[in-house]
Amino acid sequence: MTRKFNFYAGPATLPLPVLEQIRDEFVDYKGMGLSLVETSHRSKVYDGIHHQAMALVHELLGVPDNYKVLFLQGGATLQFAMVPLNLLGKGEHCDFTVSGRWAQKAYDDTAKLGSVQVLFDGAEDHYTSLPDPVSLKVSPGSAYLHLTSNETIGGIQWQQWPDTGAVPIVADMSSDILSRRIPVEKFGLIYAGSQKNLAPAGATVVIIRDDLLEKSQDNLPVYLSYKIHAQKDSMYNTPPVFVVYALKLVLEWVKSVGGIEEMERRADERANAIYDVIDTYPDFYHSPVARKDRSKMNVVFRLPSEDLEKRFVAETEAANMLGLKGHRSVGGCRASLYNSMPVEGAHALADFMKAFVGKYG
Ligand SMILES: *Cc1c(COP(=O)(O)O)cnc(C)c1O
């Protein structure tokens, strides 16, 4: 089999050794005579996997002891509602930075449930830049500040974090979690859908500071309560057994290749390879985003015409590089370069881009 380079924005590529291990263990898990996906989530075997995966999230991300790691379902999308349901008390308000499509969606659900103050809205420049984190000031009495660390569609990424004092930062890190070191202690809550940087689709990782768990009201429906999930170690109901298992294998792989430092090094190498080509041929390739806010996970770029963009996508597919069409809302091209994308994939794309200029430039 020719394994193609998968530049899709998500679900994303996974490490080949992980896929192979899943294949080898799938039908008969470690000689149990059963597949893991047929096994009770209350079994010792699953319990071990579940807690190892949690411990690896703690270890690899450097999560302090006063935080809980939760494995939930409903994607990052359910967090758009769970965050305000749990963290926005009666009469309170929160602050938002609306930096693109995902922040907008989080904002929309939050505004249905409570009062929101928008500190920054990137609409005017079509969501191609982020606010200066140093001058961003939270409003008095704010319950939290929500930001989206990487805008998957727009291709912009926070490089520094605002100083919010005692106001917790809540971050949607769905598309850049574990790709760089982050000061977890600066955040009150971090959430990420699994299908970009962590695992197949089907789980959401939530990292929440212990004191914020106390804000969950007792009248919430059970599934929506962080406090209940934390009390039950994310086993209140059936967890996404297969995804947690795959997540554990991905995290073991990350650890075996050098941990988060190596993920960061690879992310830099991949993104630099593509941006270098864009910057070398400014009459042909164009990045619409502010240079200081360029995403290392989703590189968005335009070609001189839509015809050439179509041709580019078709020819990359013929060269075994998939998923380079930009999001329908912004057009153009997009290369998603998540943790499991081999650096060779980015170099192959960069070489292709140079040759493409030679042919059509
Ligand atoms: C993909 C994505 C989401 C949506 O995740 P689901 O798991 O599909 O709900 C939310 N936020 C960001 C930043 C994303 O990249």
Image (tube, grey):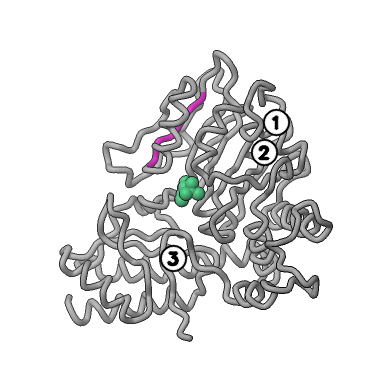
- Identified at 74% across, 69% down, the residue is 34
Contact (CB < 8 A) between labels 2 and 3?
no
Sequence-first disc among 1 and 2? 2
When the figure is inspected, residue 330 is found, relative to residue 270, above or below; the finding is: above
Q: Label 3 CB, ligand 1: below 8 Å?
A: no
Magenta residues (range): 94-100
Question: Which secondary structure type mostly characterizes the magenta part of the structure?
Answer: strand
- Identified at 64% across, 35% down, the residue is 223
Looking at the image, residue 131 sits to the left or right of residue 86; the answer is: left
Give the residue type that dot 1 points to: Leu
Give the structural element (helix, strand or loop) at label 3. helix
- The label shown at residue 213 is 1
Looking at the image, residue 10 sits to the left or right of residue 27; the answer is: left
Q: Label 2 CB, ligand 1: below 8 Å?
A: no
Q: Is residue 259 visible?
A: yes
Residue holding disc 3:
271
Residue holding disc 2:
208
